[in-house]
Structures are given as structure tokens and as C-alpha cells.
Image: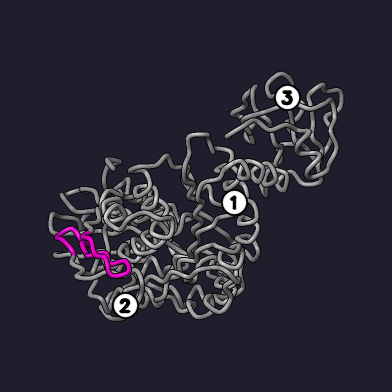
Amino acid sequence: MIAPLSLQQLQQRFGGELLNGSIEFSAVCTDTRKLDNEALFVALRGENFDAHDFLGQLEGKVRGVVTEQPIEGSELPQWVVADTTIALGQIGLLCREQFDGPVIGITGSCGKTTVKEMLSAIFGQRHKVCVTQGNLNNHFGVPMTLFSLEPEHQVMIVEMGASGPDEIGYLCSIAKPQITAVNNVMPAHVEGFGSIDGIATAKGQIYTSLQNGGVAVVNADDNYADYWRGRMPEGVRTLEVGFGHQWAVHPDNIVLNALGCPAFDLVIEGVSHPVKLQLLGEHNVHNALVAAGCAYAAGIPVAEIAEGLSLAGSVGGRMQSFRGKSGAAVIDDSYNANPGSVSAAIELLAQRDGKKILVLGDMAELGPDADKSHREMGRLALERGIDQLFTLGPLSAAASIEFASGHQHNPRNFSEREALIQALVPELDEGTTVLVKGSRSARMELVVQALTDGNQ
């Protein structure tokens, strides 16, 4: 934290009840396995846990407690509230109000973590950056990012995820970004939003939450760009990025090297600088444009943006290349999957030389469109010349069936991971590229580990 807070500040600002007096704290803890006697403990409830069950074990191990029920017989200072998850966000809001540097908020169906890391590389050349760690991007994770603000930080980059309506609006209410971007809208978590239109509305809250003087970085190539343009609050400036030369931020002269890493000229309002990405796939040019737009809105010069993009490295489980068994190239894109990111993966794989194998696990949370979406991925893999498709799980069977219909062989769909691996390994040689993709629930990283002997 930039400066300590107190329970009294929280109670006076947000209500609730104080028991056993007030304390100051400069750290917050929510995990009973990682207690800190200098921290305030917030007893959270989730679908599969309730920290209130452990309140009796906290005496002498934390400075104070935020709880929904008083701890009987305890001398610990307590802030008793109606909802500890809301209280966690309120503590985060007070931390945010201590910070006067630029705050950039990023959301989208896929690629937002890559955009976040690109921005961190850009700003990290000359600034101390507070940035979302890992995938701490929800109503628990964003407050944690706000707690990590320190006096030396000059810029904050906040990734925001959502699985249902109004979540982005809530996260914006506590993080208060002045520069925001929706990377894209694709079928992901459709079950929680009801439709793709619902996703666009929910993600668009990162724009409608902007205050006067804010900057909205808009992906002009997205189908919902016009929708967002029509909903911008008064006094918000729009900066549009896209592949067309008419947009303020666009690429020129895109080429891919032998590995599939793009190089291009980054053009921002007529000023051009070369970029060589270390990341695989042309789709990362788009991610770079969004990051560049956000950095430019914050006042970073074009040359410095280009240099930072060229320094940005890959993120675990997202388009990382390794040498696998029998000398095969294994591309690990196992972190997550939706139709948009699978399409990008197929495009990358299609550009490789030699034999091309796609290994696809189920794409989760697609609602009633799940069968259709998986079939479309199988058809796209067939059309783009992928040589073999191995799938894991009941949903991805539809992709296998569609793909196999064009090759006149039986679908290679598996219900057990080990059986898939045993069938796949004999297909590997030095002329083969295997790309592994799937939603987190499919645990496709275990397939990557088996193909590379864990040497990622």
C-alpha cells in the first residue's frame, strides 16, 4: 500500500460495526494458509470455501479481521460488515484513491493478458509499474492488485475479467481506470452472459465507466466497434486501432519469420517505427496495436512503444514453443480456449512447414452453441490444411467428426488423456509441429508436459 489504512477509516466511509477498537494496517490477507501478523484478514466466502470457518484460529496471527459475523470471545479488532467481498473491494478503492498516476484497464474475450504484458514491457523501460499478476482479474483479484500499489509506482495496469453482466462495471468502480480497451468480443463464457451481444454490453462497461477526460482505445476491426462508439460518455476521447490504414494506430508491412513471429511497422498518427515481436502468430499484431494505443494515450512516444513491444515475452501456456519427443516442435497454447483463440491457433499452425497436428480439448462455457462452435473449429482445421486433429472430451468430439469427414478416416476423439497421448506420440518426428489448445478445465497443459517430458 502507498500509505497505511485503518479500520476506523473503513467504518466511517462505508459503515458496518467496529469491535475491539481500530488498528492500522498496510497489508491484506485472504488465505488462512498464508497468514501475516502485520496484515488485515478478510474472511471471504466462495462457491467452495468459507474463511469464516477458520476465524477461531486467527488470534495472534493477524492484526485485525473483516468478517460477516463477530468472533465470540476474541480480542482481535474486527470490522463487521454485511458482505466481505464488497468490503474487499472497498479497501481496494481506498488504496486506489492514494494513487495519482495513470491507470489503464484492459478487458476482452481473449488476448487481454498478452496485452497487459505488452503494456508492462512498454512502461517498464522507464517507469515503475504496478500490474495484475497472473490471472488475478476478478472481484477478488483486482482488489489484490490495488493492495500491491507502493509509493514508487508510477503506472498501474489492471486486467479485468468477467463471467457475467455488471462485473466489469463493478471492477471499474474500484480501479477507476482513465484509459481503457476492449481487446475483442468472441464467444467465451457465453453461459454467464446469455449471448455474444450480452458479452459486448458487459465488456463495454469499461468504456461507459470512463469519466470526463478519459481515453477509450477501440478495436475498430471488432464487430461491436460502432456499438461502443455510440455509447461513449461525454468528454471521453476515442482512439481507434486496427489493421486498416485509416485508423490512428495500425500496422504496415507485416511479415512472419520462420517460427511464425511477426515483424511490422507500427504506425501511430503518421509516425512509423519497426517492431519485431517475440510472440508467435499474426493475431499478436492486433494485441500489439491495442497495447500501443493504450501506451500512446498515456503519452509514451512511438519509438519507445515499438521498443517495448519488441521486448515483450510470451506468457506461460500462450503460444510458447518447445522441442518435444522425437524432435517435434510443440506449441503450448493450453492456457484457455474459445472459438476466437482456437481460430488464431489454427491460422498459426497452418503457416508452419511439415506435418501439422492440432490437439484440441473441450472449449467450455459456450452454452447452447457448444456443438456448433466445436464443429466450426473442426471444419476450419480441415479447410486450413491441418494434417491431423486429436481431440479430448465429449464436446470436442464434434470437431473430430467434422474434421474426419473430409479425410475419410475415423474421428480421433479420446475420453482419457493418457490414451490420447499414447496415440499421438508415434506421430511425432522432426518434421512435425503439434499445437495443443483447450479450456483450462481440459487440463491440456498435461498433454504438453507429456510431449515435452516436462522440459518447458
Q: Nearer the viewer, mark 2 or mark 3?
A: 2
Dot placed on the residue nearer the N-terminal end, 2 or 3: 3
Dot placed on the residue nearer the N-terminal end, 1 or 3: 3
Name the residue beneath numbered marker 1.
175
Left or right of residue 302: residue 428: left
The residue drawn where x is 22% and y is 65% is 265
Name the residue beneath numbered marker 2.
244
Name the residue beneath numbered marker 3.
57
Left or right of residue 33: residue 271: left
Looking at the rendering, the stretch of residues picked out in magenta corresponds to 256-274
Is residue 263 located in the magenta-colored stretch of the structure? yes
Rendered position, 329 above or below 25:
below
- The span from disc 1 to disc 3 (Cα, nearest Å) is 32 Å
Which secondary structure class fits the magenta region best?
A: strand
Where residue 344 appears, as percent x and y from the top left, is 33, 68
Answer whether residue 55 is visible to the viewer in this image: yes
Between 389 and 267, the residue placed more toward the observer is 267
The residue drawn where x is 42% and y is 39% is 128
- The span from disc 2 to disc 3 (Cα, nearest Å) is 60 Å
Q: Which quadrant of the rendered structure holds the C terminus? A: top left
SS for callout 2:
loop
Dot placed on the residue nearer the N-terminal end, 2 or 1: 1
